[in-house]
Amino acid sequence: ASGVRAPQHATPLEALKTVYGYDAFRGDQQQIVEHVVGGGDAVVLMPTGGGKSVCYQVPALVREGTGLVVSPLIALMHDQVDALVANGVHAAYLNSTQAPDERARVERAYLAGELDLLYVAPERLGGEQTLRLLERGTLSVIAIDEAHCVSQWGHDFRPDYLALGGLADRFPGVPRLALTATATPETHREITERLRLPEARHFVASFDRPNIRYRIEAKSEPRAQLLSFIRSQPEGSAGIVYALSRKSVEQTAEYLARQGIDAIPYHAGLDAATRARHQSRFLREDGVVVVATIAFGMGIDKPDVRFVGHIDLPKSVEGYYQETGRAGRDGEPAQAWMAYGLGDVVQQRRLIQQGDGDRAIRQRQGQHLDAMLALCETVGCRRQNLLGYFGQASEPCGNCDTCLTPPETWDGLVPAQKLLSTIVRLKRERNQAFGAGHLIDILRGGSTDRIRKMGHDALSTYGLGADLSEQDWRSVIRQLLARGLLVAQGEYGTLALSEASGGVLRGETPVPLRRDAIGRVSRSGGPRK
Ligand code: ADP
Ligand code: ZN
Protein backbone atom coordinates (compact mmCIF):
# COMPACT_ATOMS: atom_id res chain seq x y z
CA ALA A 1 0.00 0.00 0.00
CA SER A 2 1.21 3.49 -0.63
CA GLY A 3 0.21 6.47 1.42
CA VAL A 4 1.16 9.78 2.90
CA ARG A 5 1.67 10.15 6.61
CA ALA A 6 -1.12 12.38 7.90
CA PRO A 7 -0.29 15.21 10.33
CA GLN A 8 -0.25 13.74 13.82
CA HIS A 9 -0.87 16.98 15.68
CA ALA A 10 -2.87 20.09 14.90
CA THR A 11 -0.40 22.65 16.21
CA PRO A 12 3.29 22.76 17.15
CA LEU A 13 2.51 23.53 20.77
CA GLU A 14 0.14 20.58 21.02
CA ALA A 15 2.85 18.30 19.60
CA LEU A 16 5.39 19.70 22.05
CA LYS A 17 3.11 19.08 25.01
CA THR A 18 1.78 15.64 24.09
CA VAL A 19 4.90 14.06 22.64
CA TYR A 20 7.62 15.57 24.80
CA GLY A 21 5.69 16.74 27.82
CA TYR A 22 7.22 20.24 27.70
CA ASP A 23 5.12 23.27 28.62
CA ALA A 24 6.65 25.77 26.27
CA PHE A 25 9.18 26.26 23.51
CA ARG A 26 12.62 27.47 24.46
CA GLY A 27 14.77 30.14 22.86
CA ASP A 28 14.25 30.31 19.10
CA GLN A 29 12.46 26.96 18.90
CA GLN A 30 8.99 28.35 18.29
CA GLN A 31 10.10 30.73 15.54
CA ILE A 32 12.12 28.01 13.86
CA VAL A 33 9.28 25.50 14.02
CA GLU A 34 6.72 27.98 12.67
CA HIS A 35 9.03 29.05 9.87
CA VAL A 36 9.58 25.44 8.79
CA VAL A 37 5.95 24.41 9.21
CA GLY A 38 5.19 27.32 6.88
CA GLY A 39 7.49 25.75 4.27
CA GLY A 40 10.63 27.86 4.80
CA ASP A 41 14.24 26.68 4.87
CA ALA A 42 16.36 27.34 7.95
CA VAL A 43 19.95 27.33 9.11
CA VAL A 44 20.07 26.76 12.87
CA LEU A 45 23.20 27.41 14.94
CA MET A 46 22.46 26.44 18.50
CA PRO A 47 24.79 25.21 21.24
CA THR A 48 24.64 21.65 22.53
CA GLY A 49 21.70 21.25 24.85
CA GLY A 50 19.88 24.13 23.18
CA GLY A 51 17.12 21.84 21.93
CA LYS A 52 17.76 21.33 18.24
CA SER A 53 15.78 18.09 17.93
CA VAL A 54 12.46 19.80 18.63
CA CYS A 55 13.19 22.20 15.74
CA TYR A 56 12.81 19.47 13.13
CA GLN A 57 10.81 16.80 14.93
CA VAL A 58 7.84 19.02 15.70
CA PRO A 59 7.46 20.25 12.09
CA ALA A 60 7.55 16.60 10.98
CA LEU A 61 4.67 15.83 13.35
CA VAL A 62 2.59 18.77 12.20
CA ARG A 63 3.17 18.64 8.43
CA GLU A 64 1.90 15.99 6.08
CA GLY A 65 4.46 13.35 5.11
CA THR A 66 7.56 11.87 6.71
CA GLY A 67 10.43 13.91 8.13
CA LEU A 68 13.84 12.89 6.79
CA VAL A 69 16.70 13.28 9.27
CA VAL A 70 20.25 13.03 7.98
CA SER A 71 22.57 12.17 10.82
CA PRO A 72 26.19 11.01 10.62
CA LEU A 73 26.13 9.27 13.96
CA ILE A 74 25.01 5.79 12.99
CA ALA A 75 25.79 4.49 16.45
CA LEU A 76 23.22 6.86 17.91
CA MET A 77 20.41 6.40 15.44
CA HIS A 78 19.21 3.35 17.21
CA ASP A 79 18.96 5.12 20.58
CA GLN A 80 17.40 8.24 19.11
CA VAL A 81 14.78 6.23 17.29
CA ASP A 82 14.07 4.09 20.36
CA ALA A 83 13.52 7.21 22.46
CA LEU A 84 11.07 8.59 19.89
CA VAL A 85 9.20 5.32 19.61
CA ALA A 86 8.90 5.25 23.40
CA ASN A 87 7.17 8.64 23.14
CA GLY A 88 4.71 7.28 20.63
CA VAL A 89 6.39 8.71 17.53
CA HIS A 90 6.58 6.46 14.48
CA ALA A 91 10.29 6.67 13.78
CA ALA A 92 12.72 4.35 12.01
CA TYR A 93 16.17 4.41 10.44
CA LEU A 94 18.05 3.16 7.43
CA ASN A 95 21.76 2.52 7.71
CA SER A 96 24.50 0.12 6.71
CA THR A 97 24.39 -1.90 9.91
CA GLN A 98 20.90 -3.16 9.19
CA ALA A 99 19.90 -6.61 7.95
CA PRO A 100 18.25 -6.56 4.49
CA ASP A 101 14.85 -7.74 5.72
CA GLU A 102 14.84 -5.07 8.41
CA ARG A 103 15.66 -2.47 5.78
CA ALA A 104 12.88 -3.76 3.54
CA ARG A 105 10.44 -3.48 6.41
CA VAL A 106 11.37 0.17 7.04
CA GLU A 107 11.12 0.95 3.32
CA ARG A 108 7.63 -0.52 3.16
CA ALA A 109 6.54 1.44 6.22
CA TYR A 110 7.84 4.66 4.65
CA LEU A 111 6.02 4.05 1.35
CA ALA A 112 2.85 3.15 3.18
CA GLY A 113 2.94 6.53 4.92
CA GLU A 114 3.34 5.01 8.36
CA LEU A 115 6.41 6.98 9.47
CA ASP A 116 6.66 10.36 11.16
CA LEU A 117 10.45 10.40 11.02
CA LEU A 118 13.03 8.50 9.03
CA TYR A 119 16.71 8.71 10.02
CA VAL A 120 19.19 8.08 7.25
CA ALA A 121 23.00 8.02 7.23
CA PRO A 122 24.51 10.56 4.79
CA GLU A 123 26.32 7.92 2.72
CA ARG A 124 22.99 6.40 1.70
CA LEU A 125 21.99 9.67 0.05
CA GLY A 126 24.98 9.67 -2.30
CA GLY A 127 23.45 6.84 -4.35
CA GLU A 128 20.31 6.69 -6.46
CA GLN A 129 18.70 3.79 -4.63
CA THR A 130 17.71 5.59 -1.47
CA LEU A 131 16.88 8.80 -3.32
CA ARG A 132 14.44 6.95 -5.60
CA LEU A 133 12.85 5.27 -2.64
CA LEU A 134 12.37 8.63 -0.91
CA GLU A 135 10.86 10.10 -4.08
CA ARG A 136 8.22 7.40 -4.18
CA GLY A 137 6.96 8.51 -0.77
CA THR A 138 6.25 11.98 0.62
CA LEU A 139 8.67 13.99 2.73
CA SER A 140 7.43 16.65 5.13
CA VAL A 141 10.78 18.21 5.99
CA ILE A 142 14.47 17.44 5.51
CA ALA A 143 16.76 17.99 8.50
CA ILE A 144 20.53 17.85 8.10
CA ASP A 145 22.06 17.43 11.53
CA GLU A 146 25.71 18.17 12.35
CA ALA A 147 25.69 20.38 9.26
CA HIS A 148 29.23 21.64 9.95
CA CYS A 149 30.42 18.28 8.56
CA VAL A 150 29.94 19.77 5.07
CA SER A 151 32.82 22.17 5.66
CA GLN A 152 35.95 20.80 4.09
CA TRP A 153 38.06 23.07 6.22
CA GLY A 154 36.29 22.47 9.47
CA HIS A 155 37.39 19.97 12.07
CA ASP A 156 34.87 17.28 11.25
CA PHE A 157 34.58 17.10 7.46
CA ARG A 158 32.62 14.18 5.99
CA PRO A 159 32.77 13.83 2.20
CA ASP A 160 29.27 12.30 2.08
CA TYR A 161 27.87 15.65 3.15
CA LEU A 162 28.92 17.29 -0.12
CA ALA A 163 26.19 15.39 -1.99
CA LEU A 164 23.45 16.66 0.32
CA GLY A 165 23.16 19.94 -1.60
CA GLY A 166 21.52 17.84 -4.32
CA LEU A 167 18.49 17.28 -2.10
CA ALA A 168 17.44 20.80 -3.09
CA ASP A 169 16.73 19.64 -6.65
CA ARG A 170 15.40 16.21 -5.80
CA PHE A 171 12.84 17.48 -3.33
CA PRO A 172 11.75 20.95 -4.36
CA GLY A 173 9.06 22.29 -2.10
CA VAL A 174 10.18 20.28 0.91
CA PRO A 175 11.51 22.67 3.59
CA ARG A 176 15.07 21.94 4.62
CA LEU A 177 16.92 22.74 7.85
CA ALA A 178 20.63 22.56 8.51
CA LEU A 179 21.56 22.35 12.20
CA THR A 180 24.84 22.50 14.05
CA ALA A 181 26.24 23.28 17.48
CA THR A 182 29.53 24.63 16.23
CA ALA A 183 30.24 26.94 13.36
CA THR A 184 32.64 29.75 12.77
CA PRO A 185 31.29 32.51 10.49
CA GLU A 186 33.19 30.84 7.66
CA THR A 187 31.68 27.41 8.27
CA HIS A 188 28.27 29.04 8.53
CA ARG A 189 28.79 30.49 5.06
CA GLU A 190 29.89 27.11 3.73
CA ILE A 191 26.82 25.37 5.16
CA THR A 192 24.53 27.88 3.47
CA GLU A 193 26.33 27.58 0.17
CA ARG A 194 27.07 23.88 -0.05
CA LEU A 195 23.75 22.66 1.28
CA ARG A 196 22.13 25.11 -1.14
CA LEU A 197 20.09 27.15 1.30
CA PRO A 198 20.26 30.64 -0.23
CA GLU A 199 16.72 31.56 0.81
CA ALA A 200 16.97 30.11 4.30
CA ARG A 201 16.29 32.10 7.42
CA HIS A 202 19.20 32.01 9.82
CA PHE A 203 18.71 31.41 13.52
CA VAL A 204 21.91 31.99 15.41
CA ALA A 205 21.71 31.48 19.14
CA SER A 206 24.39 32.64 21.52
CA PHE A 207 27.04 29.96 21.86
CA ASP A 208 27.71 30.99 25.42
CA ARG A 209 27.43 28.32 28.08
CA PRO A 210 27.48 30.60 31.11
CA ASN A 211 27.32 27.78 33.66
CA ILE A 212 30.57 26.24 32.40
CA ARG A 213 33.69 27.50 34.13
CA TYR A 214 36.75 27.27 31.91
CA ARG A 215 40.18 26.57 33.31
CA ILE A 216 43.39 25.80 31.44
CA GLU A 217 46.54 25.17 33.39
CA ALA A 218 50.14 24.40 32.49
CA LYS A 219 50.94 20.70 32.34
CA SER A 220 53.56 19.46 34.74
CA GLU A 221 52.39 16.10 36.06
CA PRO A 222 49.15 15.65 34.14
CA ARG A 223 47.75 12.65 35.99
CA ALA A 224 48.38 14.10 39.42
CA GLN A 225 46.93 17.42 38.27
CA LEU A 226 43.89 15.63 36.90
CA LEU A 227 43.44 13.72 40.13
CA SER A 228 43.61 16.86 42.22
CA PHE A 229 41.12 18.54 39.89
CA ILE A 230 38.68 15.61 40.16
CA ARG A 231 39.08 15.51 43.93
CA SER A 232 38.18 19.19 44.09
CA GLN A 233 34.78 18.39 42.54
CA PRO A 234 31.71 17.64 44.65
CA GLU A 235 31.43 14.00 45.69
CA GLY A 236 29.58 11.89 43.13
CA SER A 237 30.20 14.19 40.16
CA ALA A 238 30.02 12.51 36.77
CA GLY A 239 32.71 13.54 34.32
CA ILE A 240 34.42 12.86 31.02
CA VAL A 241 38.19 13.08 30.59
CA TYR A 242 39.52 13.25 27.05
CA ALA A 243 42.92 11.91 26.02
CA LEU A 244 44.38 11.61 22.55
CA SER A 245 45.50 7.99 22.41
CA ARG A 246 43.96 4.69 23.43
CA LYS A 247 47.02 3.89 25.49
CA SER A 248 46.80 7.12 27.41
CA VAL A 249 43.07 6.49 27.94
CA GLU A 250 43.79 3.06 29.42
CA GLN A 251 46.63 4.23 31.63
CA THR A 252 44.81 7.27 32.92
CA ALA A 253 41.68 5.28 33.76
CA GLU A 254 43.80 2.70 35.61
CA TYR A 255 45.67 5.40 37.49
CA LEU A 256 42.46 7.13 38.59
CA ALA A 257 40.88 3.82 39.58
CA ARG A 258 43.92 3.00 41.74
CA GLN A 259 43.43 6.36 43.44
CA GLY A 260 39.87 5.46 44.33
CA ILE A 261 38.02 7.27 41.53
CA ASP A 262 35.29 5.29 39.80
CA ALA A 263 37.00 5.66 36.42
CA ILE A 264 36.48 3.54 33.31
CA PRO A 265 38.03 3.68 29.82
CA TYR A 266 36.21 4.15 26.54
CA HIS A 267 37.77 4.01 23.07
CA ALA A 268 37.20 2.38 19.70
CA GLY A 269 39.68 -0.41 20.46
CA LEU A 270 37.51 -1.91 23.21
CA ASP A 271 35.06 -4.59 22.18
CA ALA A 272 31.48 -3.55 21.62
CA ALA A 273 30.16 -5.24 24.77
CA THR A 274 32.67 -3.45 27.01
CA ARG A 275 31.94 -0.14 25.34
CA ALA A 276 28.21 -0.61 25.79
CA ARG A 277 28.67 -1.62 29.43
CA HIS A 278 30.87 1.37 30.22
CA GLN A 279 28.58 3.79 28.44
CA SER A 280 25.57 2.47 30.27
CA ARG A 281 27.34 2.69 33.65
CA PHE A 282 28.19 6.31 32.88
CA LEU A 283 24.60 7.09 31.92
CA ARG A 284 22.88 5.28 34.77
CA GLU A 285 25.16 5.44 37.81
CA ASP A 286 26.30 8.44 39.83
CA GLY A 287 29.85 9.68 39.95
CA VAL A 288 31.32 7.65 37.10
CA VAL A 289 34.28 9.22 35.31
CA VAL A 290 34.81 8.06 31.72
CA VAL A 291 38.30 8.47 30.32
CA ALA A 292 37.87 8.49 26.57
CA THR A 293 39.12 9.35 23.14
CA ILE A 294 37.02 11.89 21.25
CA ALA A 295 34.93 8.99 19.91
CA PHE A 296 32.99 9.19 23.16
CA GLY A 297 30.23 11.63 23.83
CA MET A 298 28.80 12.44 20.42
CA GLY A 299 25.14 12.88 21.05
CA ILE A 300 25.27 11.28 24.49
CA ASP A 301 22.33 12.79 26.28
CA LYS A 302 23.44 12.98 29.91
CA PRO A 303 22.40 16.36 31.22
CA ASP A 304 24.25 16.20 34.55
CA VAL A 305 27.84 15.74 33.41
CA ARG A 306 29.58 17.97 35.97
CA PHE A 307 33.00 18.25 34.38
CA VAL A 308 34.95 17.65 31.21
CA GLY A 309 38.72 17.37 31.43
CA HIS A 310 41.37 17.39 28.72
CA ILE A 311 44.81 15.97 29.41
CA ASP A 312 45.84 16.47 25.78
CA LEU A 313 45.35 19.51 23.62
CA PRO A 314 42.31 19.31 21.30
CA LYS A 315 43.11 19.87 17.63
CA SER A 316 40.78 22.83 17.22
CA VAL A 317 38.68 25.32 19.13
CA GLU A 318 35.58 23.74 17.56
CA GLY A 319 36.58 20.38 19.01
CA TYR A 320 37.31 21.89 22.41
CA TYR A 321 33.99 23.72 22.41
CA GLN A 322 32.05 20.63 21.38
CA GLU A 323 33.73 18.39 23.96
CA THR A 324 33.51 20.84 26.86
CA GLY A 325 29.90 21.50 25.81
CA ARG A 326 28.95 18.05 27.07
CA ALA A 327 29.29 19.40 30.61
CA GLY A 328 26.38 21.04 32.37
CA ARG A 329 23.61 20.59 29.84
CA ASP A 330 21.21 20.83 32.80
CA GLY A 331 22.29 24.44 33.33
CA GLU A 332 23.82 23.73 36.76
CA PRO A 333 27.43 24.83 37.41
CA ALA A 334 29.97 22.72 35.53
CA GLN A 335 33.71 22.74 34.91
CA ALA A 336 35.85 22.53 31.81
CA TRP A 337 39.41 21.79 32.85
CA MET A 338 42.51 21.27 30.75
CA ALA A 339 46.20 20.74 31.29
CA TYR A 340 48.36 21.74 28.38
CA GLY A 341 52.11 21.86 27.88
CA LEU A 342 55.05 22.20 25.57
CA GLY A 343 54.85 18.55 24.51
CA ASP A 344 51.32 19.11 23.19
CA VAL A 345 52.44 21.91 20.89
CA VAL A 346 55.42 19.97 19.56
CA GLN A 347 53.40 16.79 19.08
CA GLN A 348 50.54 18.47 17.25
CA ARG A 349 52.81 20.45 14.94
CA ARG A 350 54.56 17.20 14.12
CA LEU A 351 51.29 15.39 13.43
CA ILE A 352 50.30 18.17 11.05
CA GLN A 353 53.65 18.19 9.26
CA GLN A 354 53.63 14.44 8.85
CA GLY A 355 49.96 14.21 7.95
CA ASP A 356 48.98 13.05 4.49
CA GLY A 357 46.84 16.04 3.51
CA ASP A 358 47.99 18.46 0.83
CA ARG A 359 49.56 21.81 1.62
CA ALA A 360 46.26 23.67 1.91
CA ILE A 361 44.91 21.12 4.39
CA ARG A 362 48.05 21.26 6.52
CA GLN A 363 47.86 25.03 6.47
CA ARG A 364 44.28 24.93 7.70
CA GLN A 365 45.18 22.44 10.42
CA GLY A 366 47.94 24.80 11.48
CA GLN A 367 45.43 27.62 11.72
CA HIS A 368 43.14 25.46 13.86
CA LEU A 369 46.03 24.69 16.17
CA ASP A 370 47.07 28.36 16.32
CA ALA A 371 43.56 29.38 17.39
CA MET A 372 43.57 26.66 20.06
CA LEU A 373 46.96 27.84 21.32
CA ALA A 374 45.77 31.44 21.40
CA LEU A 375 42.93 30.33 23.66
CA CYS A 376 45.38 28.49 25.93
CA GLU A 377 47.82 31.36 26.17
CA THR A 378 45.41 34.28 26.38
CA VAL A 379 45.77 36.62 29.33
CA GLY A 380 42.20 37.82 28.69
CA CYS A 381 38.87 36.13 29.40
CA ARG A 382 38.72 32.57 28.03
CA ARG A 383 35.02 32.82 27.21
CA GLN A 384 35.52 36.07 25.34
CA ASN A 385 38.23 34.41 23.29
CA LEU A 386 36.08 31.31 22.68
CA LEU A 387 32.97 33.22 21.64
CA GLY A 388 35.07 35.62 19.60
CA TYR A 389 36.30 32.63 17.61
CA PHE A 390 32.69 31.89 16.68
CA GLY A 391 32.18 35.51 15.70
CA GLN A 392 30.23 36.46 18.83
CA ALA A 393 31.31 39.50 20.83
CA SER A 394 31.04 39.44 24.63
CA GLU A 395 32.29 41.01 27.84
CA PRO A 396 34.74 39.37 30.25
CA CYS A 397 32.71 36.65 31.94
CA GLY A 398 33.83 36.53 35.54
CA ASN A 399 33.56 32.73 35.44
CA CYS A 400 36.83 31.49 33.97
CA ASP A 401 40.31 31.12 35.40
CA THR A 402 41.71 34.28 33.84
CA CYS A 403 38.76 36.40 35.01
CA LEU A 404 38.87 34.93 38.51
CA THR A 405 42.66 35.08 38.86
CA PRO A 406 44.14 37.34 36.20
CA PRO A 407 47.45 35.82 35.15
CA GLU A 408 50.60 37.71 35.97
CA THR A 409 52.85 38.48 33.07
CA TRP A 410 56.60 38.86 33.02
CA ASP A 411 59.10 40.13 30.49
CA GLY A 412 60.45 37.13 28.63
CA LEU A 413 62.64 39.00 26.14
CA VAL A 414 66.03 38.16 27.62
CA PRO A 415 65.37 34.44 28.16
CA ALA A 416 63.88 34.27 24.65
CA GLN A 417 67.04 35.86 23.24
CA LYS A 418 69.26 33.40 25.14
CA LEU A 419 67.30 30.49 23.74
CA LEU A 420 67.17 31.77 20.18
CA SER A 421 70.85 32.62 20.09
CA THR A 422 71.71 29.14 21.38
CA ILE A 423 69.69 27.69 18.50
CA VAL A 424 71.38 30.02 16.01
CA ARG A 425 74.88 29.17 17.23
CA LEU A 426 74.33 25.42 17.14
CA LYS A 427 72.99 25.73 13.62
CA ARG A 428 75.65 28.11 12.24
CA GLU A 429 78.69 26.79 14.01
CA ARG A 430 77.95 23.09 14.06
CA ASN A 431 74.96 22.55 11.77
CA GLN A 432 73.07 20.91 14.66
CA ALA A 433 69.48 21.18 15.86
CA PHE A 434 67.91 19.91 19.07
CA GLY A 435 64.62 19.55 20.87
CA ALA A 436 63.58 21.46 23.97
CA GLY A 437 65.09 19.06 26.53
CA HIS A 438 68.68 19.33 25.38
CA LEU A 439 68.48 23.09 24.80
CA ILE A 440 67.21 23.55 28.32
CA ASP A 441 70.11 21.44 29.62
CA ILE A 442 72.55 23.70 27.80
CA LEU A 443 70.93 26.90 29.05
CA ARG A 444 70.75 25.65 32.61
CA GLY A 445 74.37 24.49 32.55
CA GLY A 446 73.57 20.83 32.98
CA SER A 447 76.27 18.19 32.84
CA THR A 448 74.66 15.37 30.95
CA ASP A 449 76.58 12.80 28.93
CA ARG A 450 75.25 14.33 25.77
CA ILE A 451 76.47 17.80 26.70
CA ARG A 452 79.94 16.53 27.53
CA LYS A 453 80.22 14.31 24.47
CA MET A 454 79.11 17.06 22.14
CA GLY A 455 81.18 19.69 23.85
CA HIS A 456 78.14 21.88 24.37
CA ASP A 457 79.55 23.17 27.64
CA ALA A 458 81.87 25.25 25.49
CA LEU A 459 79.01 27.23 23.95
CA SER A 460 78.90 30.86 25.01
CA THR A 461 75.28 30.51 26.17
CA TYR A 462 76.06 27.45 28.31
CA GLY A 463 74.66 28.00 31.80
CA LEU A 464 73.34 31.47 30.93
CA GLY A 465 69.79 30.47 31.82
CA ALA A 466 70.42 28.86 35.18
CA ASP A 467 68.20 31.49 36.81
CA LEU A 468 65.11 29.73 35.43
CA SER A 469 63.91 26.26 36.40
CA GLU A 470 63.34 23.57 33.82
CA GLN A 471 59.61 24.12 34.19
CA ASP A 472 60.09 27.85 33.56
CA TRP A 473 62.03 27.14 30.41
CA ARG A 474 59.37 24.77 29.14
CA SER A 475 56.83 27.52 29.71
CA VAL A 476 58.98 30.03 27.78
CA ILE A 477 59.46 27.64 24.85
CA ARG A 478 55.81 26.66 24.80
CA GLN A 479 54.67 30.27 24.66
CA LEU A 480 57.22 31.18 21.97
CA LEU A 481 55.99 28.22 19.89
CA ALA A 482 52.38 29.18 20.44
CA ARG A 483 53.10 32.67 19.09
CA GLY A 484 55.15 31.50 16.15
CA LEU A 485 58.36 33.08 17.51
CA LEU A 486 59.90 29.61 17.29
CA VAL A 487 59.06 26.50 15.27
CA ALA A 488 59.32 22.79 16.02
CA GLN A 489 60.40 20.62 13.11
CA GLY A 490 60.64 17.00 12.10
CA GLU A 491 59.97 13.80 13.90
CA TYR A 492 61.84 14.85 17.04
CA GLY A 493 60.45 18.35 17.33
CA THR A 494 63.80 20.05 16.94
CA LEU A 495 63.52 23.77 17.49
CA ALA A 496 64.34 26.31 14.83
CA LEU A 497 63.91 30.02 14.24
CA SER A 498 60.84 31.31 12.47
CA GLU A 499 60.61 34.38 10.30
CA ALA A 500 59.42 36.32 13.32
CA SER A 501 62.34 35.29 15.53
CA GLY A 502 64.60 38.02 14.17
CA GLY A 503 62.55 40.72 15.86
CA VAL A 504 63.13 39.04 19.22
CA LEU A 505 66.86 38.65 18.67
CA ARG A 506 67.11 42.32 17.72
CA GLY A 507 65.07 43.27 20.77
CA GLU A 508 62.31 44.81 18.65
CA THR A 509 59.53 42.35 19.46
CA PRO A 510 58.39 42.51 23.07
CA VAL A 511 57.88 39.10 24.68
CA PRO A 512 55.40 39.41 27.53
CA LEU A 513 54.81 35.91 28.91
CA ARG A 514 52.17 34.62 31.26
CA ARG A 515 53.27 33.15 34.50
CA ASP A 516 51.83 29.65 34.43
CA ALA A 517 49.16 28.56 36.78
CA ILE A 518 49.71 24.94 37.65
CA GLY A 519 47.26 23.05 39.77
CA ARG A 520 47.86 22.24 43.40
CA VAL A 521 50.47 19.60 42.73
CA SER A 522 53.16 22.02 41.72
CA ARG A 523 54.69 25.45 41.99
CA SER A 524 53.76 28.15 39.54
CA GLY A 525 56.05 28.70 36.60
CA GLY A 526 58.09 31.74 35.65
CA PRO A 527 61.00 33.16 37.54
CA ARG A 528 60.43 34.18 41.14
CA LYS A 529 61.50 37.73 41.73
P1 ADP B 1 20.71 19.57 21.18
O1 ADP B 1 20.43 18.55 20.10
O2 ADP B 1 20.61 20.97 20.71
O3 ADP B 1 21.96 19.30 21.94
P2 ADP B 1 18.44 18.39 22.43
O4 ADP B 1 17.47 18.47 21.34
O5 ADP B 1 19.08 17.06 22.70
O6 ADP B 1 19.57 19.48 22.24
O7 ADP B 1 17.80 18.95 23.75
C1 ADP B 1 18.59 19.19 24.88
C2 ADP B 1 17.80 18.96 26.15
O8 ADP B 1 16.83 19.96 26.32
C3 ADP B 1 17.06 17.64 26.12
O9 ADP B 1 17.21 17.02 27.38
C4 ADP B 1 15.64 18.04 25.83
O10 ADP B 1 14.79 17.09 26.40
C5 ADP B 1 15.54 19.41 26.48
N1 ADP B 1 14.56 20.31 25.82
C6 ADP B 1 14.54 20.66 24.51
N2 ADP B 1 13.55 21.52 24.25
C7 ADP B 1 12.90 21.76 25.43
C8 ADP B 1 11.80 22.58 25.84
N3 ADP B 1 11.13 23.34 24.95
N4 ADP B 1 11.45 22.55 27.13
C9 ADP B 1 12.12 21.78 28.01
N5 ADP B 1 13.17 20.99 27.70
C10 ADP B 1 13.57 20.98 26.43
ZN1 ZN C 1 36.20 35.00 31.74
Image (spheres, rainbow, N blue to C red):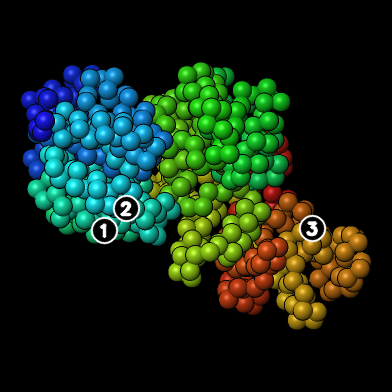
Q: Badge 2: few (under 14), some or many (20 or more) residues near its Cα, within 10 Å?
A: many
Q: Amino acid at mark 1?
A: Arg
Q: Nearer the viewer, residue 271 or 55?
A: 271
Q: Residue at x 61, y 41 (%)?
A: 246
Disc with the residue nearer the chain's start (3 vs 2)? 2
Q: Amino acid at mark 2?
A: Tyr
Q: Which quadrant is the N terminus positioned in?
A: top left
From the image, tell me which residue sits under label 2.
161
Choose mark 1 or mark 2, whichever is in front. 2
Mark 2 and mark 1 in contact (Cβ < 8 Å)?
A: yes
Does residue 176 appear in the picture of this structure? Answer: no
Q: Position of residue 379 (x, y in %)?
A: 53, 52
Q: Which element is circle 3 on?
A: loop
Q: x, y (%) of residue 95? A: 34, 39
Position of residue 81 measured from the top left corner of the image (x, y, whole percent): 31, 28
- Numbered circle sitting on residue 467: 3
The quadrant in which residue 56 appears is: top left
* Residue 487 coordinates in the image, percent (x, y): 62, 67
